[in-house]
Image (spheres, coloured by chain):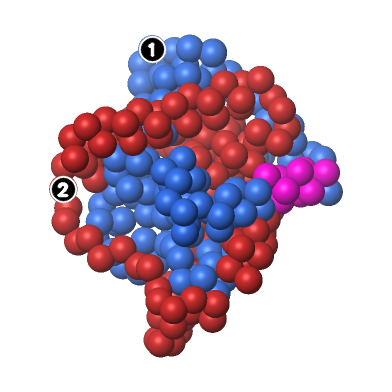
Chain colours: A red, B blue
Amino acid sequence: MQKIVALFCGFFFASGLIISGMTNPHKVLSFLDIFGKWDPSLAFVMVGAIGVYSLSYRWIVSRTAPVCGDKFSIPSNKDLDKKLIIGAILFGCGWGLAGFCPGPAIVNITLLNKQVIVFFAAMVMGSLIFQFTNKLNA
Amino acid sequence: MIDYSNFTPYSALIGGVIIGLSSAMLLLFNGKICGISGITGNILVFKRHDTLWRTMFFAGLVCGGIVTFTLFPTTKAFVSDASTTVLICAGLLVGYGTRLGNGCTSGHGVCGMSRFSKRSILATCVFMISGMVTIYIVKHVVGG
């Protein structure tokens, strides 16, 4: 059941990304470019998503367990550490360069566009490099 | 200066609500936080118990992409002016950075901010500012 829910959530999530305009890198970059011709649309995506999620969050975690599982996996880490900040800086640079964050990059590979495939392959490489170097440090 | 010709508040809001609903469903049914970089990045870790639902979520994203792009063909039209070199650098930064910082726009930006997690609020502010500074340099300093 959990697998079917995951498939369905992924499906629904992708359609939300496309309808919202997040899958269009030009739109993302116009949002980030506050000193150019600014397109504030993506702020509305955040408002819609955070509005729904924050309202349902309290109700959901007040349950003793999820519907198809035995416990909620919610991050317990509270450290505002260097890794978090450096990671966010690096991610922001990449986001501002190409206009893709991970979700829209995955959804866009279905268009089989060469640029997206190059970006996606590099993103997977970046993730693997992290995994490899993290293992060495551990 | 606001670019009203490309401003799409309604579809953005509707899309955002759908994103919020699907993230809430994943929490309600599976008890998982809907962070794309974490869910998909950890497919490559091969933890026996977790790999299958993560892969199913990834498959859902792909199927959702195919179906929605087919239903709304105009959404397919996108332009990226970035060169191959820039795309490779950007991809590496996004892949590495989201794993190091434990999240991206969905995990930190949507789920984390909604939970009032201090880590996520900080991360979201940092990657937003970092993205804004990057495009400012690319467009108005180098490209200006």
Q: Is residue B46 visible?
A: yes
- Is residue B130 one of those drawn in magenta? no
Q: For residue A87, which quarter of the picture?
A: top left
Q: Position of residue A9 (x, y in %)?
A: 62, 62
Quadrant containing the N terminus of chain A is: bottom right
Badge 1: chain ID: B
In this rendering, is residue B53 above or below B101?
below
Bounds of the magenta span? B61-70
Farthest front residue in view: B48
Q: Position of residue A107 (x, y in %)?
A: 64, 41
Name the foreground residue: A44 vs A52.
Answer: A52
Q: Position of residue B122 (x, y in %)?
A: 26, 52
Q: Which mark is residue B71?
A: none
Name the foreground residue: A130 vs A30.
Answer: A130
Amino acid at circle 1:
Val
User: Do badges 2 and 1 share one subunit?
Assistant: no
Q: Main secondary structure of the magenta part?
A: helix
Q: Position of residue B83 (x, y in %)?
A: 54, 13
Quadrant containing the C terminus of chain A is: top left
Q: CA distance from mark 2 to mark 1?
A: 32 Å
- Is residue B66 one of those drawn in magenta? yes
Badge 2: chain ID: A
Amino acid at circle 2:
Asp
Residue designated by label 1:
B142
Residue designated by label 2:
A81
Q: Is residue B1 visible?
A: no
